[in-house]
Amino acid sequence: MDDDATRAPDPSGIDAIPAPEGATTLIDTDYTIGQDNVELQVGPFGLDIHNPVFLISGLTIVAFVVLTLAFQNSVEPLFAGLRDFLTSTLAWFFLGAANIFVILCLVLIASPLGRVRLGGKEATPDYSYIGWFAMLFAAGMGIGLMFYGVSEPISHYSTAIGGVSAEAGVRTDWAPLGGAAGDQAEAVRLGMAATIFHWALHPWAIYAIVALALALFSYNKGLPLTIRSIFYPIFGERVWGWTGHVIDVLAVLATLFGLATSLGFGAEQANAGLAFLFGLPNNDGSKVVLILAITGVALISVVAGLDAGVKRLSEINMVLAALLLGFVILVGPTVLILGGFFQNLWAYVEYLPALSNPVGREDANFSQGWTAFYWAWWISWSPFVGMFIARVSRGRTVREFLTCVLIIPSLVSVLWMTAFGGTAIDQIVSQGITAVQDAPLELKLFEMLQGLPLTQITSFVGILLVIVFFVTSSDSGSLVIDTITAGGKVNAPVPQRVFWAVFEGLIAVALLLGGGLAALQAMAVSTGFPFTIVLLLGCFAIVKGLMSEPR
Amino acid sequence: MYRKILTPIDLAHRDRLAKAVDTAIDLARHWAIPVVLVGVTEAAPSAIAHNPQEYARKLAAFAEETAQATGVAVEARAYTAHDPATQIDETILKAVADTGADLVVMASHAPTIGDALVPSHGGRLASHTAISVFLVR
């Protein structure tokens, strides 16, 4: 690490432009950013949107929502069937691709290509480590950690200790690998390893690949900050035509449906939590109020902008999450958690080759139903999270970038899973409390916190975190969609991002009331398949792009 | 009366800002003082430039051109912001402090209902600075 990394950026985020920041190899293209844009005046608002990506995305979204609402009984099995077909038949493809992403990231960290700096040789980081990490977590993973931190380790532990069962030669159990029938200690290890496997290197490598490709082609090569730019080395000038339009529209659809359905389900889960804690009525009215409140705060955040809104909320969130994590570690089984961190890390390393093996798997339920599903899910979120990470990562070297996007978040995930899952398993194993095990998914975290002191306070922090994590996904997602639909312009008029944030909230409300959240979520996860191909091509583009950069 | 005029400029919409720039130049000529053109850009590539350095060069060239055409001393100052769409006002305030300008001449749209959601930059600037602000409509 050199001086650049430790030099604090201007806290206001605004700098008078310094002397040239060193050589980069610009890609020579005739395309000018915004050349396909149209500027409109809608009422009092000026808009600057990409033609046709904005219109096609908007209309397709409306069409899908209307179709889903009108024919939800026939659409849901269709989309769910598509998702299940992809994650079962093509499980090997998802697992194999994710392994390639991890390996490429690790190789790049070690190779001389890691010296390339995003934004030019003398560029300085746009954000401090704290602000950067806060935004990494807030955009892409925080909300999942809240919900699955307690439940997933328990699931894998229970199925592992249950061992293998088969019917007509087909495994009917959900245990990872061969399970650990009756062996409690080994079942805990396998359960934690399997959970960490889904939340550590692989998801972060998926995000890192998209983010690195975008940052490289945008900051170093001068192409617009939009998904299609990754493909310039492959398709050349054609990326500015329909090839690129399709890629960008797909990215917008995956992001918006992913966000809107998560928001809808999130409202259900947050409502259940609030009902459990404070006796709030658990009905559609409260859920709609929750969605509108989350969207309202996201709206304030996007209008305030990246620094004053999104970054600040992410930092608040990180402090709250750190407090909750610290509390669980201190008040829960401290020694068990701290020792568990290293044991689980070791279990992860030990089981990693078997868990990530894409072919010849005996544990179809686990490898397809859990792993391939997760990979498709992470990949369908990767255009959004990757683009947001790229937006805030200028000025880091490739090595520093990958270490901070891959290794450190993975370690945090291990610690988080150990603290929350480990405490919950401990409650089951050594205290015989099964409340957590029996509780529905959305209440598991709160049941676990009930086993610790100060329940009222920690549960309140928990629910607040859930809600604010939704806000930080919603606001950063709106920024990303706005940039893509403005043809890569990051300074498009503010009313456009307001539009996307509101649109997303309204779709969540429509699907919640009319039904179809599950259907559209299945659709969103299915987009993981085309994007896996996109990411694999992205790997090639990254290597090719990095080779031509001065190091 | 004044020492230096500051005029924010958007290189992508030069035509729309012509009136504000002309006003600034005329006033500068009247008092024989310099004009500073301030541009705000993002780190990501834009329609104007592939990177902030290229943007700064283009802004400097525009200032040079204006100076030669009018005979008024015109300098350029480019800034990068993380999210320019929401950071125009604070950037101009920073530029005022950096350059020691004591009059801002800038283009602004007539007030509309939309200002409730996204306030006009000129209006907000005037309520956050002690120096004079001349809004050109």
Image (tube, grey):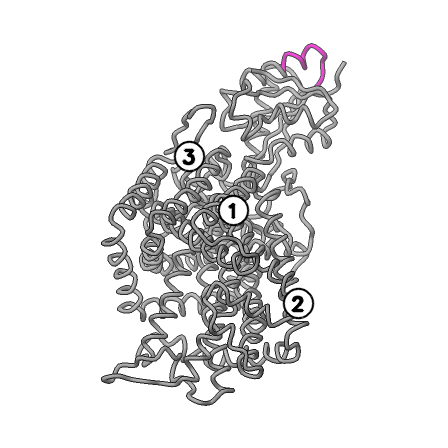
Looking at the image, which residue is at 66% across and 12% down?
Answer: B27
Residue A41 visible: yes
Chain of the residue where label 2 is placed in the rendered structure: A
Vertical side of A447 occupied by A535: above or below: above
User: What are the residue bounds of the magenta stretch?
Assistant: B25-34
Chain of the residue where label 3 is placed in the rendered structure: A
Three-letter amino acid code at disc 2? Answer: Phe
Report if residue B109 lies within the magenta region.
no
Vertical side of A270 occupied by A342: above or below: below
Image side of residue A81 versus residue A43, left or right? left
Image side of residue A320 versus residue A474, left or right? right
Residue matched to label 2: A327
Q: Which of the two residues, A479 or A475, is positioned nearer the viewer here?
A: A475
Mark 1 neighbour density, 10 Å: few (under 14) some (14–19) many (20 or more): many
Q: Quadrant of the C terminus of chain A?
A: bottom right
Q: Which of the two residues, B55 or A293, is positioned nearer the viewer here?
A: A293
Mark closer to the observer (3, 2): 2
Alpha carbons under labels 1 and 2: distance apart: 26 Å
Vertical side of A18 occupied by B116: above or below: above
Residue matched to label 1: A294
Residue, far right: B1
Q: Main secondary structure of the magenta part?
A: helix
Three-letter amino acid code at disc 1? Answer: Ile
Looking at the image, which residue is at 41% across and 42% down?
Answer: A506
Asked if marks 3 and 2 fall on the same chain, the answer is yes
Asked if marks 1 and 3 fall on the same chain, the answer is yes
Give residue B30's quadrant in the image.
top right
Three-letter amino acid code at disc 3? Answer: Gly
Residue A551 visible: no
Alpha carbons under labels 1 and 3: distance apart: 32 Å
Percent across and percent down for residue A13 are: 64, 43
Residue matched to label 3: A34
